Image (tube, helix red, strand yellow):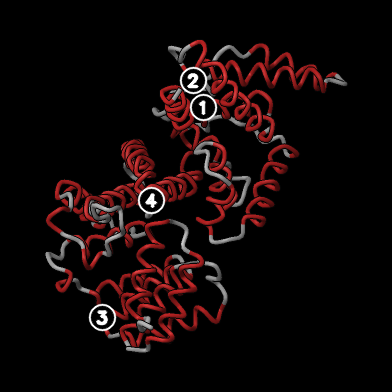
Amino acid sequence: MTGTHDAVDRAFRDEWGQVVATLIRVTGDWDLAEECAQDAFAQALQTWPRDGVPERPGAWLTTAARNRATDRLRRAAVGAAKLREVAAMEAVQSGDPGHDGTVPDDRLRLMFTCCHPALALDAQVALTLRTLAGLTTAEIAQAFLVGEQTMSKRLTRAKQKIRHAAIPYRVPPAHLLPERTPAVLAVLYLLFNKGHSADPAQAELSGEAIRLARVLARLMPDEPEAVGLLALMLLHDARRPARFDAAGDLVLLEDQDRTRWDTREITEGTALLDAVLKRGRPGPYQVQAAIAACHAGAARAADTDWAQIAALYGELARLGPSPVVELNRAVAVGMADGPADALPLVEALDASGQLAGYHLLPAVRADLLRRLDRTAEAAAAYRDALALAPTDAERRYLHRRLTEVTPEP
C-alpha cells in the first residue's frame, strides 16, 4: 500500500499540470479541470493498489480525468453548446496540450500557456501556481503575503475573466513569448522559494525550478533576467547543504559551515551573473543575484560586505519597490551600521501594516532588540513571530531565541 501511495504522490508531482492543462484546453473550464483531475487521483488511490501502477501513469490519469469530465458535461448537457463540449472531450485522445515546438519542455510550455497577458501579472502567477504546480490556495496566499480568502477571490476572478472573454488556452507563438516571460520568471522563482523554504521535504521543487530556468535561459539567451534568475537560484541553492543541521533545525547564514557550500554552483552562478551584468540591462533578478554573490564570496561571515548588500537592496527597491525588499535592506543596514540604525526602518514597516502577518517582520525586529539588550521587548517580538511561523524548523529556531532572552524562573 505504501508503494502505491508513493506512486500516486510521484504522479501528482509529475503529471498534475499536464492532466489539468489537457482538460482546460478542451473544455475552457478551469474549475471543472481541477475537480476532475482531483477525482482521477482519488480513483488512482482506489484502483492502483488492486490493479497495479500503470506503465504510463500520466496517460491513465488523463484518461480517467477526461472520462470524468465527459460524464459531468453529458449530465449537464442542456443545449447545443454543452453537447459540443462533450464531443470535444470525446475527441481528445492525448494529453498533449498542443505542442508546436516553440517551447521544448512540457512544463515550461504549460507555464507560457497559462501566463496569459490579458490577466494582471499577479493573477497570471497565482493561477499558474495553482493550476500547474498544484500549490494550495493557502500556499499561494502565503507567497503573496495576503490572506487565503483574498487569494481565493483573485483566483476565482481570473478564471471568470478567462471564461467570459473566451481566452484560448494554447501555446503562444515565438514572437509573443517575451510578453509572458515576466510571469513565467515569477512562477519559477516562487517555486524555487517554496522548495528552498525551511522545510527540507520541499527541496525537489527547487531542483525542478532550476532545471526549468536552465531551459528558459537557453530558449531566451537575449533575456538578461532569465539568466539573472538562473544565477540567483544557483547561488542560493549552493547554501542548501549547510542550511539545516543533523536534527533538521534551521542554521542561520552567519552560523553555516561554509565549507559545505556547493562550490560548483557558486562558480557557475557567479560566472552567469558576471556575463549578464556586462550587457548593461540590470533587472531585479540580476540585483538579487548580486546580493547572493556577495554572501557566496565571503569565506567567513565576518567578511561579508554588508554595506554593499545594503546598497544593492536600495537599488532593488528602486527597480521594484516592495516592503519585503525594505525589510531585507533593514537587515543589511543592521549588519553594516548596527541595530540602532535598522530598528527605526523595521518599526516604520510595522506601523505601515504592509507586512501584517509576515513572520519575518517580528523575527527581524526581535533580533534587533536582542542585539540592543532590550530583552523583554525582544521576547514579545519572538512570541509574535512564533505565532506566525509557517514551518516546524522556523518555529524551533524562534523558540530557541525566545529561550535565550527569557529569564529563568
Sooner in the amino-acid sequence: mark 3 or mark 2:
2
Residue sitting at x 33%, y 44%? 222
**Mark 3 vs mark 2, CA separation in Å:** 52 Å
Residue ID at (49%, 48%): 183
Residue 368 pos. (x, y %): 35, 81
- Gap in angstroms between the C-alphas marked 4 and 2: 27 Å
Does residue 300 appear to the left or right of 56 in the view shown? Answer: left
The tag earlier along the polypeptide, 4 or 1, is 1
> What amino acid type should be assigned to the residue bearing mark 1?
Gln
- Locate residue 236, reporting x and y percent: 28, 54
Tell me if label 2 and label 1 are in contact, CB under 8 Å: yes
Mark closest to the chain's N terminus, 1 or 3? 1
The front one of 143 and 399 is: 399
Marking on residue 336:
3
Element marked by disc 4: loop
Task: Give the secondary structure at mark 3.
Answer: helix
Amino acid at dot 2: Gly
Circle 1 sits in a helix, a strand or a loop, which is it? helix
Mark 4–mark 2 contact, CB under 8 Å?
Answer: no
User: In the displayed structure, does residue 299 sit left or right of residue 311?
Assistant: left
- Name the residue carrying label 4: 199
Q: 2 above or below 250?
A: above
> Can you identify the residue that label 2 sits on?
58
Q: Are marks 1 and 3 in contact (CB under 8 Å)?
A: no
Q: Secondary structure at mark 2?
A: helix
Numbered mark located on residue 18 in the image: 1
Looking at the rendered structure, the kind of residue marked 4 is: Asp
151 sits left or right of 240 in the view: right
Q: Nearer the viewer, mark 3 or mark 2?
A: 2
Q: Whole-Å distance between the Cαs marked 4 and 1?
A: 26 Å
Instruction: From the top left corner, tell me how far across and down residue 407 is, in percent.
Output: 36, 84
* Real-space CA distance between mark 2 and mark 1, rounded to the nearest whole angstrom: 8 Å
